[in-house]
Every structure is written in C-alpha cells, then in structure tokens.
Image (tube, rainbow, N blue to C red):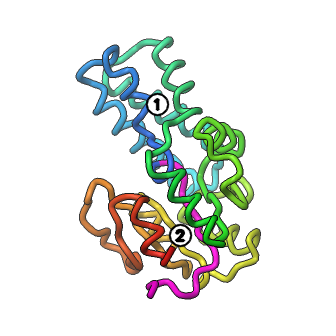
C-alpha cells in the first residue's frame, strides 16, 4: 500500500530536479578545462543566494536576470573573461538536459490519474523553453512560475500557487525537489515533501523533514503506489 494514500497531485521543482543545471558547463568542459566544476558550482550557488537575498530585501528580479548575475560572479571569481563562452553557457541554460528518468516518471504518474505540475523559480519563458526542449510538453497540468507571486521559494506564497491553481489541498499534494531547502519549505507549507537526493547529501538541519528520500525520479512512481 502506498505511503501517500491521499495524494491527488504531484508538483515538481524544475531546476536540479527535472533539469540538470550543470549540463551547460559539462557540454563545454573541453573548452573551460579544469575550472568547469568550480564554475558550475559557483554559478548555481550565487544564483540561489541572489534569489534569497532579493526576496529578503524586497528587490525582485526575474530568474533569468538572477541566472546571468550568478554566472557573471562565477566567471569573475574563476578568472574567466570570455564573452563568447558566457553567451553559449546562457544559451545552453535555456535548453537544459532533462534527467534521463524525468519524462518516464512524470508520464507514469499522469497515466495513473495523478495531476502533475511544475512549480519553479524560473521565469515563464525559461520554463516554456526548458519543457519544450526536453520534449515534456503535454505531461503537466500546469507550469507555474514564482513570477505569479513576485517572490522566490521558499516563501509560502510560492507554494500556495500550487494549491490555488490546481484547486487541491496541501495535504493532497506530493512536492518533489532535489533541493533540500526547497523540500524544507514545502514540508513546512504542508505538502508531502519528497527529496530527490541524487548526491546523497546529509539531511538539512531544519524544523521540517521530507516525508521520503529517494535517489532518482525512477523511484517516485513506486513510492506513490503507481
């Protein structure tokens, strides 16, 4: 019997969960060289830091701007000054690789009658491009951007978008993310939070814990009884 008997909808984070945020630097590894891993890590770190800082400061900019700002910091910090490389990395970010198990897992949930959605920091046009390039059009009932709330995760106002748009109670939603801080925010809001912990990081030291921890999206259908 499923451990999630009341779930009616499954809501996914996008970046890092469905889409591999490190794929741009991986594709240009031969050109970037030994600084590639550090560049990618810093880019992601600053991208997220800037979302949190902007939310706390009340100075919003969309995720595309934040993504560019994070990359600019990472390039300077790693001593890379190459406008052509910057442009190509940003272009690749608009069409990130989906994880190999993403489409099949979401499709299985949808085929079983569960509603599916994305709830992401991404700007609407970024999400549209990511979903299209990953051939995932048609597998989501909704693709929701934080731009509808004007603040970034983990604000409760963002998670409320899912309940409002899907018209499903928080207690009936499984929220799936690879980001521990996102999982904590979703659990605090009242979702059944599932952490896709591919890197097997230690648990976050937060007041709320995930309902379940998996290491790939391929495990999700069975977890939800599909």
For the stretch drawn in magenta, the main secondary structure is loop
Say which mark, if any, is on residue 71.
Answer: 1
Magenta highlight on residue 10: yes
> Would you place residue 205 above or below residue 103 in this image?
below
Magenta highlight on residue 165: no
Query: Which residue lies at the image location 54% right of the left edge and 18% below the top edge?
Result: 87
Occupied quadrant, residue 171 = bottom right
Q: Residues within 10 Å of mark 2 (few under 14, many from 20)?
A: many
Query: Which residue lies at the image location 70% right of the left edge and 67% below the top edge?
Result: 161
Q: Residues within 10 Å of mark 1 (few under 14, many from 20)?
A: many
Occupied quadrant, residue 94 = top right
Query: Which residue lies at the image location 65% right of the left edge and 39% below the top edge?
Result: 126
Marked residue nearer the N-terminal end (2 or 1): 1
Q: Secondary structure beneath disc 1? A: helix
Q: Secondary structure beneath disc 2? A: strand
> Would you place residue 29 above or below residue 160 in this image?
above
Start-end of magenta stretch: 1-15
Disc 2 target residue: 175
């Amino acid at each position: 019997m499923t451990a999630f008997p009341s779930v009616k909808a499954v809501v996914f984070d996008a970046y890092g969960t469905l889409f591999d945020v490190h794929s741009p630097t991986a594709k240009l590894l031969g050109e970037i060289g030994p600084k590639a891993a550090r560049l990618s890590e810093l880019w992601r770190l600053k991208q997220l830091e800037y979302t949190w800082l902007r939310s706390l400061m009340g100075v919003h900019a969309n995720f595309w701007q934040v993504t560019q700002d994070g990359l600019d910091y990472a390039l300077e910090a790693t001593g890379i000054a190459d406008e052509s490389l910057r442009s190509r990395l940003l272009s690749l970010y608009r069409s990130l690789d989906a994880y190999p198990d993403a489409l099949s897992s979401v499709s299985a949930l949808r085929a079983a009658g569960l509603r599916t959605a994305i709830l992401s920091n991404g700007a609407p046009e970024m999400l549209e491009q990511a979903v299209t390039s990953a051939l995932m059009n048609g597998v989501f009932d909704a693709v929701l951007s934080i731009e509808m709330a004007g603040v970034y995760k983990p604000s409760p106002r963002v998670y409320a978008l899912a309940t409002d748009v899907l018209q499903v109670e928080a207690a009936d939603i499984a929220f799936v993310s690879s980001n521990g801080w996102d999982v904590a925010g979703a659990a605090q809001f009242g979702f059944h939070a599932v952490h896709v912990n591919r890197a097997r990081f230690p648990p976050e030291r937060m007041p709320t814990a995930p309902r379940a921890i998996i290491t790939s999206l391929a495990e999700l259908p069975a977890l939800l009884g599909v």
